């Protein structure tokens, strides 16, 4: 792409260099401390919940007695991230420290005690973390009551909560003489950005709870962010990154920035977010970091055709050649992904946008074969995603003898699309496959619709909902109903807040659960019991209704597994899916070695 410059060094060396420049930060007051000193972090866990413990990128085993030991070479005081099981905490460690940590669990509560060097500082960090969690829970619990207040009273409430955090820090400063300057700055910054983020969300939440626009000064947001983006060292703070992301969301919402834009489900990613970053009054290092991070996310979650313009802009807007090289390589890799299918065809055009079908044919395929078809819809919350995500699965089903097709559909982060738009696209995809059965070499009576997460919802809708009007008159009366379903971690009830439903739609009209009838096509359903994206209770409700209606289906719940299934679950899904397809005549049984 124009503006992206290649250099002679390897990308891995460059990425390490840029990580050093922006994340291995040198604390103020420590310039000149270049002598490396031995530092140890020891500890004990009880009970033992994992066989290892992590300090930043370093892992050490936990002994049979629960003991562990890290040996570090440090040249200056530094913050580290310690993670054990599901718990994470910040540690502050100085050269020559000998810090000891006791991690115990009693009555489901975790108790952590520090001794040795920097014990007081690390005890304080832990207490601040707990206090912040309590504050977050209080604000969440009383969100409507707090954010429905007029601005002066809202600020009073927020300032009183902030003062509690600052009093603890002031108390520590009095007790600990010669408190490390970077420690002090970092803790103060964490407190500031935690509460600044709450200020940012006031207009949005006030509008959500009252239905009215908040009475705030015209420069409300500017006052909050003034002199905020001038220090690249802040990129090491999670609170700063969270605050910055919230601000960019608001700026990307354009004219809706004083409203509940999340409820409107407008597009705040892609080009809108890129523009918000490029217009940011920030240190060049911070702006380059945000631009690169946005491009990484966009390339990983959207088809290359949707990021081409952004990549071109990035080449001209970014001043960091190391980031340019990284993004160029990611973009080139995403382009190569589109070379994997045997064919790519446009199955539908919506408002000038071509929607693609990525097609994989089985070995020895001929167009007069009349193979079974496997139609797949990717996940991504109806907001993002790309057909490339299903290339692996598509190849797998092509090897089983099917014509496998991964479909693109309208997305909120690309075209402001709603769930109902995705349903129309999915129905059009099935109708297109049937209408072009001879050209595709498939049997129009042997079509399997499959999907993951939001894509699972769309696949289910093709089997359950009536045709809602695709505007594809050339398909005539061809049915959009597949002959079987395979759904994984699917959304069965996209109703309520948080879903990108059009304000003109009744969400229940696009809910598989609310529209389920009998008879249904043969179905195979999979879900994890620990799915926090699509709660297992909703899956159970759908399964219960399928049983009540005496529909033909099989299902499997994976105990302790989340939304993103593990390798063991994937193997079971593959085995059960193949057996399901064989039993219903979509493929022939294979003799496994």
Image (spheres, rainbow, N blue to C red):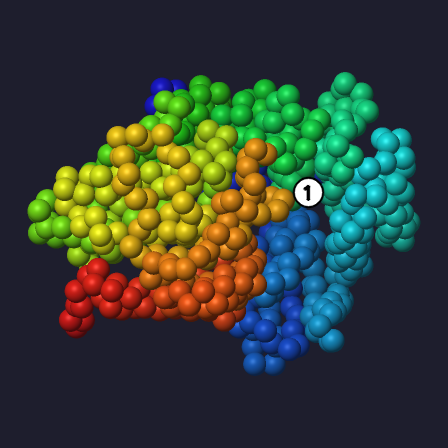
304 or 579: nearer the eye?
Answer: 579
Q: Secondary structure at mark 1?
A: helix
Task: Give the residue at x 58% y 47%.
Answer: 495
What residue appears at the point 83 percent right and 42 percent down from the top-left corner?
Answer: 146
**Residue at the spot x=37%, y=51% of the render?**
463
Q: Nearer the viewer, residue 285 or 273?
A: 273
Q: Quadrant of the N terminus?
A: top left
User: Horizontal and vertical percent for residue 166?
Assistant: 86, 45
Q: Quadrant of residue 585?
A: bottom left
Task: Confirm whether residue 185 shows in the render.
Answer: no
Q: Quadrant of the C terminus?
A: bottom left
* Residue 486: % across, % down: 35, 58
Q: Is residue 324 above or below residue 172?
A: above
366 relative to 426 in the view: left or right: left
Relative height, residue 419 to residue 561 (above, below): above
On the image, numbered disc 1 is attached to which residue? 239
Q: Answer whether residue 250 is visible to the viewer in this image.
A: yes
Q: Position of residue 60 (x, y in %)?
A: 53, 67
């Amino acid at each position: 792409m124009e503006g992206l410059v290649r250099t002679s060094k390897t990308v891995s060396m460059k990425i390490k260099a840029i990580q050093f420049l922006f994340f291995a930060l040198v604390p103020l007051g420590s310039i000149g401390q270049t002598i490396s000193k031995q530092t140890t972090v020891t500890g004990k866990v009880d009970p033992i919940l994992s066989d290892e413990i992590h300090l930043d990128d370093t892992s050490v085993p936990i002994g049979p007695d629960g003991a562990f030991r890290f040996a570090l070479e440090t040249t200056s005081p530094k913050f580290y991230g310690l993670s054990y099981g599901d718990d994470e905490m910040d540690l502050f460690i100085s050269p020559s420290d000998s810090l000891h940590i006791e991690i115990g669990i009693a009555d489901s509560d975790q108790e952590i005690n520090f001794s040795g060097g920097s014990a007081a500082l690390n005890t304080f960090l832990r207490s601040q973390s707990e206090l912040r969690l309590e504050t977050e829970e209080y604000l969440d619990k009383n969100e409507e009551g707090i954010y429905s207040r007029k601005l002066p009273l809202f600020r009073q409430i927020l300032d009183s909560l902030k003062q509690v955090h600052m009093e603890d820090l002031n108390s520590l400063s009095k007790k600990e003489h010669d408190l490390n300057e970077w420690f002090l700055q970092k803790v103060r910054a964490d407190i500031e950005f935690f509460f600044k983020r709450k200020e940012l969300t006031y207009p949005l939440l006030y509008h959500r709870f009252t239905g009215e626009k908040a009475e705030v000064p015209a420069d409300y947001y500017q006052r909050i962010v003034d002199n905020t983006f001038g220090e690249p060292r802040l990129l090491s703070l999670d609170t700063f990154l969270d605050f910055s992301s919230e601000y960019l969301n608001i700026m990307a919402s354009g004219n809706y920035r004083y409203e509940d834009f999340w409820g409107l489900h407008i597009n705040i990613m892609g080009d809108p977010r890129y523009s918000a970053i490029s217009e940011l009054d920030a240190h060049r290092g911070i702006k380059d970091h945000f631009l690169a991070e946005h491009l990484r996310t966009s390339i990983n979650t959207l088809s290359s055709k949707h990021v081409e313009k952004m990549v071109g802009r990035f080449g001209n807007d970014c001043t960091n050649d190391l980031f340019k090289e990284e993004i160029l390589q990611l973009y080139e890799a995403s382009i190569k992904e589109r070379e994997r299918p045997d064919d790519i065809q446009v199955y539908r055009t919506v408002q000038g946008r071509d929607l693609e079908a990525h097609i994989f044919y089985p070995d020895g395929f001929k167009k007069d074969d009349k193979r079974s078809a496997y139609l797949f819809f990717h996940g991504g919350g109806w907001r993002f995603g790309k057909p490339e995500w299903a290339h692996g699965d598509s190849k797998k089903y092509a090897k089983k003898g099917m014509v496998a097709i991964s479909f693109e559909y309208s997305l909120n982060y690309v075209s402001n699309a709603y769930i109902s738009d995705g349903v129309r696209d999915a129905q059009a995809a099935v109708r297109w496959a049937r209408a072009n059965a001879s050209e595709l070499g498939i049997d129009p009576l042997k079509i399997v619709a499959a999907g993951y997460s939001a894509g699972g919802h769309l696949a289910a809708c093709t089997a359950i909902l009536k045709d809602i009007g695709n505007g594809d008159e050339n398909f005539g009366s061809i049915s959009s109903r597949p002959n079987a379903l395979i759904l994984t971690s699917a959304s069965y009830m996209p109703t309520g807040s948080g879903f990108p439903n059009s304000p003109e739609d009744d969400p229940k009209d696009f809910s598989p659960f609310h529209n389920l009838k009998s008879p249904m096509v043969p179905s195979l359903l999979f879900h994890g019991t620990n799915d926090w994206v699509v709660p297992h209770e909703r899956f159970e409700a759908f399964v219960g209704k399928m049983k009540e209606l005496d529909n033909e289906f099989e299902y499997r719940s994976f105990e302790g597994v989340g939304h993103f299934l593990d390798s063991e679950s994937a193997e079971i899904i593959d085995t059960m899916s193949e057996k399901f397809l064989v039993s219903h005549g979509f493929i022939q049984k294979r003799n496994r070695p």
